[in-house]
Amino acid sequence: MSTEQVRAPQRPTVSRTQPEGVVTETPASPAVLQADDLHVYYGEFLAVKDVDLDVPPHEIVAMIGPSGCGKSTVLRCLNRMNDLIEGCRVTGAVRYHGIDLYQPAVNPVEVRRRIGMVFQKPNPFPKSIYENIVFGPRISGMPKAGFEELVETSLRKAALWDEVKDRLKSSALGLSGGQQQRLCIARAIASNPDVLLMDEPCSALDPIATGRIEDLMHELKADYTIVIVTHNMQQAARVSDKTAFFTVEVNPDSDRRTGVLVEYDDTEKIFSAPADQRTENYVTGRFG
Ligand SMILES: Nc1ncnc2c1ncn2[C@@H]1O[C@H](COP(=O)(O)OP(=O)(O)O)[C@@H](O)[C@H]1O
Ligand SMILES: [Mg+2]
């Protein structure tokens, strides 16, 4: 499959416009992302197992659970970021609009363009605000003529334009932490993704900056599908439509613990009437 073929069909139809020659093993599903029997190893160590998860379009899915249960690991599987970690091996499937992202012919760079990622610590490049936004598009050969408009629309979508429009050529490193994180969101948006993955995007931010990112996430839902890892249960309850609760299980044959997806459901249900006792213990603060 060529780069061109990792292409998201127009929403909301899913597999009908799938590229020729791409065979999916499952019938069309409206899910944007689907993890199917996902297991992830670091070397011999099974870090997380048995993950089945459907991410519907234009929803926010939160992944919660105690430290080490595999939230970041699973998140990184969703855009093949784990490829960059030596020894990391994935079994099962991750489908993006029905296309298995782990087929050998899929181009991981194109995958990461369509499925953008925002990290825990804001990581703008040591360049101007403007250059941060056009960095990816420049590499992928976008004509310069479109840059100005791209910078403005990306910054507007990330709710940062009004604060920085008069200093686009200033260093991104001069921005506050919250502004830097919104710049990283704008930078991801500039590559025209349809999914945003966020790994604890507010954990380095103060409550006001956190509130701004949470408000922004609600706005971004209109255009994007979002998966967020958070250690903050209140945040999951505030921002997400669906919540996946992971925990760790002790291995019978080693002292290392393997993460497992316990329950995945509407956020309201997870927090008010979870099906699994382990979920209940966690969300009521009795564990974790
Ligand atoms: N690069 C790595 N190499 C080896 N083990 C790792 C690596 N990253 C994470 N792990 C292990 O995988 C498990 C899940 O980690 P992680 O996905 O970071 O959990 P979480 O994000 O839920 O805290 C943990 O046991 C962790 O020690
Ligand atoms: Mg993590």
Image: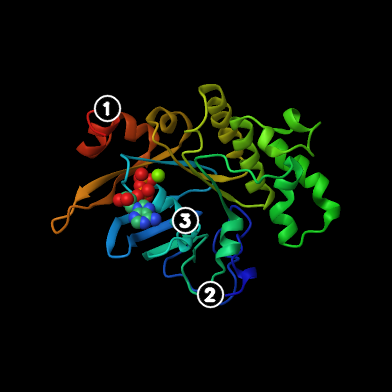
Residue at the (54%, 25%) spot, across then down: 211
Q: Amino acid at mark 1?
A: Thr
- Residue 52 in view in this figure: no
Give left or right: position of 167 versus 260.
Answer: right
- Tell me if label 3 and label 1 are in contact, CB under 8 Å: no
Q: Residues within 10 Å of mark 3 (few under 14, many from 20)?
A: many
Q: Return the residue at label 2.
A: 105
Residue at the (46%, 36%) spot, across then down: 240
Q: Which mark is residue 284?
A: 1
Q: Which mark is residue 49?
A: none
Q: Quadrant of the C terminus?
A: top left
Q: Is residue 221 above or below residue 101?
A: above
Disc 2, SS: loop
Q: Return the residue at label 3.
A: 78
Q: Amino acid at mark 3?
A: Leu
Q: Amino acid at mark 2?
A: Ala
The image quadrant that residue 64 belongs to is: top left
The image quadrant that residue 252 belongs to is: bottom left
